[in-house]
Amino acid sequence: MSTIWTQKHKPQTLNEIVGNRDAKQQFLNWLKSWSKGIPKQRAALLHGSPGVGKTVTVETLAKELKMELVEKNASDYRTADAIKRFAGLASQYATLFGGNRLILLDEVDGIAGKEDRGGVRELTNVLKTSRSPVVLTANDAYNPRFSTIRKYCLVIPFKRPTVREVVSHLKRICSKEGIAANEEALKFIVERSGRDVRSAVNDLQALAQGKNRLAMEDVQWLAGRDRKEVIFDVLRTILYSKDSWEAKKAVSNADVDPDMLFNWIYENTPYHLTDPHDLVKAMNYLALADIYRKRIRTTQYWSLLRYVIDFMSSGVAVSRQRTKSSGWVPFRFPEKIRMLSRTKGERALQKSIGMRIRKRCHISATRSAREVMPYLKIIFENNPEMAAGLSNWLDLDEDMIEYLAGNKKQTKTIIAKLA
Amino acid sequence: MSYEMWAEKYRPKSLDKIINQKEIVDRLQSFVKAKNVPHCIFAGPPGTGKTTAALCLAMDLYGKGYREHLMELNASDERGIKMVRETVKTFARTRSIGEIPFKILILDEADNMTSDAQQALRRTMERFTETCRFIMIANYSGKIIEPLQSRCAPFRFSYMSQEDQDRYLRHIIQEENIKILDEGYDAIFEVSEGDLRKATNALQAAASMGKVIDAETVYSVIGRANPADVNEMIKTAMKGDFLGARKKLRDMILKYGVAGSDIIKQIHTEIFRSMLPDSWKVTLSEAVGEADFRLVQGADVEVQLSALLARMTEAGQELSRGG
């Protein structure tokens, strides 16, 4: 399963694609017209700014109309030669399986460069003669170099969807992910993305993954300059300046959620302070910052935040004493945040298996996770018959069996033996 | 082959079937004879028969319908004061019908109860002594508050000898028709360290492979069943690989759901078992104690234990320099 939300929550039907009703309809009509013979325009040019749904519309329609989608990224097909080879595909009627073929040449902006004149000419030939529908996508259809291409294409403009449309898309995702999201917070994300659906979904994932609620405070730090750059700047100052004042200033000026920042610093510090002596100091300061975080949570005494910031910025900065710079080390996304969301479902499942074990085995659900489940896993992976018997005895559901068996095939074998 | 967990299937159903803990069994049998049981604490390491002895006592005492007179609670799953207020009181106060006028309440993993809950239990125990006897089961009786301890008869369970363990396993092996080499027995004893639940589970998992059980099978089963290998994590840190050690820590906490308090307990044990110079053992122990206290206060498990791992990485480096 893909963990990128833009993939995971990709629209499955034309209706689920955000906005652009007219454009989608126009494109659908043109595609359907191929069933009555080759139409006047053998190609369609979908254009619009990034993240408005051009490519996903093509992919979804191909699936709905059961067409074979041949997808090429234009940036790989810039030269005349490559386009000629590609043209071979377009000149055939249908696929081996009798279905229709739809050829997608994504991001043709790439071919419009100076050195690709031959490429544009060759592409024009393809568009004139193709026996299968060809779709081009571009950000800017009015680039002068497209003037010839445009003549042979049905030009369909894609507009940015409204804020409301994108917000309701994000809401759908949130409900699937089990996140209670504040409407204003979602609106904020969408507006900041410039109504670019893909970018909005990516931002939502970065902000909300692994949480069960998303509030305005969680998203506000998106404001200002590019957030990633802000965080990277702060990290650079903390890990390399050795200057307590600079480090502290960097954090206070960054306007980034301190909790989020803490996770970034905690993740990255050991990669940059490699001398064990320095690392001990830095990790101790981070542990101290963590204690103050806890104190804030229990007392709600927010002015303690200044100590959290001191320890995680200046504390880490002054810890660099012996570590020598060893060239450029990339910053990493906090693994803890990533793992928390990845293992959330797993932990819930573990707990429910534990409750079933408890009913039978005179052991707490908590302890069974360590003392019984690991052995069950080995049995379920190796011995479907014994596994089936134990599933009955423990009254396990199918998803529990799958968790213990580790894969779908073994799960099926076990379930077949249950009957 | 049979389709239950063997640890349950072959759990003794009567006191006279318990193979070790001779003195304890004798005393419990005398309770049965007298038809009177005091409040008890069963303390001892895991897999030494504490829960089994409590269940057997109830079975011998009440006979077939023992379930009506018995309640089993597990403090790890419901450790708060609410449990004592509601569940325990409701069960404890009603009188049992039958020859024996009291019921038995088994409170397993009682050392995981909060001290508030233990305080609440103190009164409940006293008030309902007539109708209910408590058997508290714990790994460390020291974690049970004094006032409770003084109300209970203490029983100290100890690890099983290899001879006893082998005898118990041999019975299962015959019943289940398994093939095992002698080295298999030795390996199981070595890895289970006298913990009979662990031994039985390892045996069943090894048997599920469908081959003759040799030492190698046993080691591979145990290796796979113990992702929470604290020892391995410490070694990784001491070798200087802090990042590798932190990765192991994360897996334990997030993937396998091991509690922070359990990890820290094991770290503490491992430090004193290790080959470290004594002065380092004490230094590290101080750091472990501080981390432990912080966890109790509710700090983040991973962050606090990472700081501890960094300390071990440093120790490893200084030791290798010192020769």
Image (cartoon, rainbow, N blue to C red):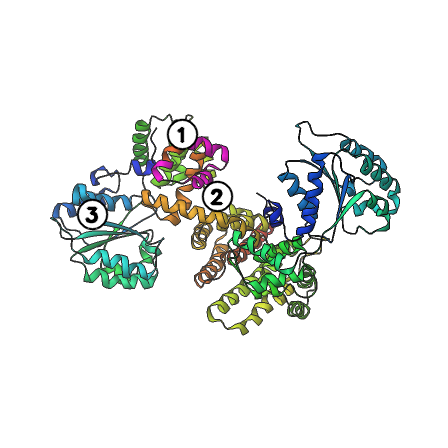
Residue B186 visible:
no
Secondary structure under tag 3 reads helix
Closer to the camera: disc 3 or disc 1? 1
Check whether the beta carbons of the residues at disc 3 and disc 1 lie within 8 A of each other. Answer: no
In the depicted structure, whether residue B177 falls above or below residue B6 = above
* Label drawn at residue A417: 1
Q: Would you place residue B79 above or below residue B188 in this image?
A: below
Q: Amino acid at mark 1?
A: Lys
**Which of the two labelled residues, at mark 2 and mark 3, occupies the earlier sequence position?**
3
Q: Which residue, given by chain and number where applicable, does mark 3 sit on?
A: B68
Q: Residues within 10 Å of mark 3 (few under 14, many from 20)?
A: few
Q: Mark 2 and mark 3 in contact? Answer it, CB < 8 Å.
A: no
C-alpha separation, residue under disc 2 versus residue under disc 1: 29 Å
Q: Quadrant of the N terminus of chain B?
A: top left
Q: Tag 3: residue type? A: Glu
Query: Pointers 2 and 1 in contact (CB under 8 A)?
Result: no
Q: How far, Cα to Cα, is label 3 from label 1?
A: 35 Å
Which residue is label 2 attached to?
A: B227
Q: Is residue A20 visible?
A: yes
Q: Foreground mark, 2 or 1? A: 1
Magenta stretch: dominant SS? helix
- Give the magenta-colored segment's residue range: A391-419
| Residue at figure coordinates x 48%, y 43% from the top left | B227
The location of residue A372, given as percent across then percent down, is 39, 42
Quarter of the view holding residue A209: bottom right
Total label count? 3
